[in-house]
Image (cartoon, rainbow, N blue to C red):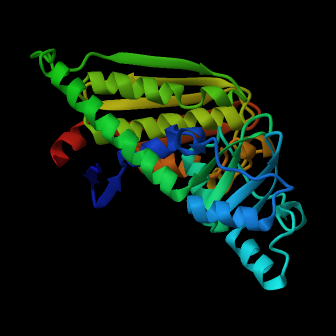
């Protein structure tokens, strides 16, 4: 499910799957209630668990808290060195790399690429083990939600056909939202609301997705880097206009901020799965018109436009 929009000589592809990895969380994809072992269980016992369940790693827990993990490599070493009948706590890998259940799937994919692991233990906000996630889990989750979105889209579009009248000259509509600094739990709400409005207007899916990416990145930028602000999405007959205005502190170096991967996000934002340094580049990539006006100590105004007529002409 991917549409291609040609603007000038440039092709832009924003798929439903790309939107989903922003919206879905690790908790939506992980395997819950994972098979675990106790620190007193022998390596032999864990070997049998792996064989029975076809796992490549087993978390070692006590009262729900993750103590370590035993992998196939650990089992092979145990067989070679003769400690296969010794307790796991003596030979397990301690302090394994974990993911949090509130991380976005795009953050999870980045961690898989970074470490090359086959699976990650997943912890909740109280540091309790709540699941295991693999690349296969992410794929299955995306397929499930793609099928669900497709079914919803067919039903929704069928219902809209009867409602679309001869006044296709879309009425002006404004979607506005105040954004609070540090309000990570609300990230993505305005982009979802705007996509719903655009869908109800019968706007081209690619336009909806590009506008939603711009709104999402603008919203998270305000949450992470500013003391608060406002996003206004104005839907016109020929375009969607998005204005993100914050109250400061401003962008010190716009050229650096436009570089992919460059970020000034703090530890909390990164821990929550934000601040990858792709916000402004993603907005510019998805926009037909993109402008930044910033002044240190006063704030920043980001103006972006996504044109509707070009989408119609590209069909």
Residue 216 versus residue 29: which sits nearer the camera? Answer: 29
- Locate residue 64 relative to residue 3 in the image: left or right: right
- Locate residue 86 relative to residue 137 in the image: left or right: right
Q: Residue furthest left?
A: 166
Number of numbered discs on residues: 0
Q: Position of residue 279 (x, y in %)?
A: 57, 46
Q: Position of residue 152 (x, y in %)?
A: 29, 29
Above or below, comparing residue 237 to residue 16 in the picture: above
Residue 274 versus residue 279: which sits nearer the camera? Answer: 274
Q: Position of residue 53 (x, y in %)?
A: 57, 58
In this orientation, does residue 210 appear?
A: yes
Q: Residue furthest right?
A: 90
Choose top left, top right, bottom left or bottom right for residue 9: bottom left
- Residue plotted at (31% across, 17% down): 172
Residue 262 versus residue 75: which sits nearer the camera? Answer: 75
- Locate residue 165 relative to residue 210 in the image: left or right: left
- Residue plotted at (78% across, 67% down): 43
Residue 19 versus residue 155: which sits nearer the camera? Answer: 155
Above or below, comparing residue 296 to residue 99 in the picture: above
Q: Position of residue 277 (x, y in %)?
A: 63, 52
- Residue plotted at (31% across, 40% down): 147
- Residue plotted at (46% across, 40% down): 213
In this orientation, does residue 18 appear?
A: no
């Amino acid at each position: 499910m991917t549409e291609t929009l040609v603007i000038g000589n440039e092709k832009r592809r924003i798929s439903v799957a790309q939107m989903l990895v922003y919206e879905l969380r690790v908790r939506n994809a992980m395997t819950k209630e994972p098979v675990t072992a106790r620190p007193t269980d022998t390596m032999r016992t864990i070997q049998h668990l792996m064989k029975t369940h076809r796992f490549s790693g087993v978390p070692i827990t006590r009262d729900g808290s993750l103590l370590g993990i035993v992998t196939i490599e650990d089992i092979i070493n145990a067989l070679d060195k003769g400690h296969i009948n010794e307790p796991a706590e003596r030979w397990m890998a301690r302090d394994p790399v974990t993911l949090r259940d509130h991380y976005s799937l795009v953050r999870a994919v980045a961690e898989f690429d970074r470490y090359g692991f086959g699976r990650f233990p997943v912890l909740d906000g109280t540091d309790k083990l709540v699941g295991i996630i693999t690349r296969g889990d992410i794929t299955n989750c995306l397929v499930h939600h793609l099928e669900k979105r497709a079914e919803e889209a067919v039903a929704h579009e069928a219902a809209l056909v009867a409602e679309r009248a001869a006044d296709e000259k879309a009425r002006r509509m404004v979607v506005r939202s105040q954004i609070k600094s540090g309000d990570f739990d609300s990230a993505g709400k305005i982009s979802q609301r705007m996509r719903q409005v655009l869908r109800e207007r019968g706007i081209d899916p690619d336009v909806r997705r590009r506008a939603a990416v711009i709104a999402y990145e603008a919203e998270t930028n305000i949450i992470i880097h500013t003391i608060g602000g406002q996003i206004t999405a104005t839907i016109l007959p020929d375009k969607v206009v998005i204005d993100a205005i914050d109250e400061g502190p401003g962008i010190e170096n716009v050229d650096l901020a436009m570089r992919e991967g460059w970020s000034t996000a703090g530890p909390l934002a990164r821990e929550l799965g934000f601040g990858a340094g792709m916000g402004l580049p993603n907005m510019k990539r998805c926009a037909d018109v993109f402008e930044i006006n910033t002044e240190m100590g006063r704030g920043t105004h980001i103006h972006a436009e996504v044109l509707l007529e070009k989408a119609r002409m590209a069909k």
